[in-house]
Amino acid sequence: VISGLTQHLSNTKYHLGKNPQESFLDRLPCRTKEELLL
């Protein structure tokens, strides 16, 4: 479990390094995205 979580975190860091807002919003449901953008 820990190794899987670590891999997920490293993948998240990689995506955040590329384009934090875009990759983060892509993971959210549309409704949550709209609420954040309001």
Image (cartoon, helix red, strand yellow):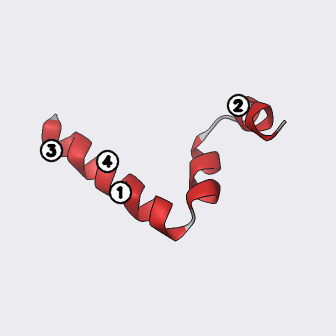
- Callout 2 amino acid: Thr
Determine the CA span between mark 2 and mark 1: 22 Å
- Callout 1 amino acid: Asn
Q: Residues within 10 Å of mark 2 (few under 14, many from 20)?
A: few
The residue under label 3 is 3
Query: Is 7 above or below relative to 19?
Result: above
Q: Earlier in the sequence, mark 3 or mark 2?
A: 3
Determine the CA span between mark 4 and mark 3: 9 Å
The residue under label 4 is 8
The quarter of the rendered structure image containing the N terminus is: top left
At which x and y percent is residue 9? Answer: 32, 49
- Callout 4 amino acid: His
Determine the residue positioned at 25% across, 51% down: 7
Side of 23 where 13 appears, left or right: left
Q: Earlier in the sequence, mark 1 or mark 3?
A: 3
Q: Residues within 10 Å of mark 3 (few under 14, many from 20)?
A: few
Query: Is 36 above or below relative to 19?
Result: above
In the drawing, what numbered circle is on residue 11? Answer: 1
The residue under label 2 is 32
- Callout 3 amino acid: Ser
Determine the CA span between mark 3 and mark 2: 29 Å
Side of 32 where 13 appears, left or right: left
Q: Considering the numbered disc 2 on the image, is that residue within a helix, a strand or a loop?
A: helix
Determine the CA span between mark 1 and mark 3: 12 Å
**Dots 1 and 4: beta carbons under 8 Å?**
yes
Determine the residue positioned at 78% across, 31% down: 35
Q: Considering the numbered disc 1 on the image, is that residue within a helix, a strand or a loop?
A: helix
At which x and y percent is residue 15? Answer: 46, 61
Q: Earlier in the sequence, mark 4 or mark 3?
A: 3
Q: Residue furthest right?
A: 38
Determine the residue positioned at 46% across, 66% down: 17
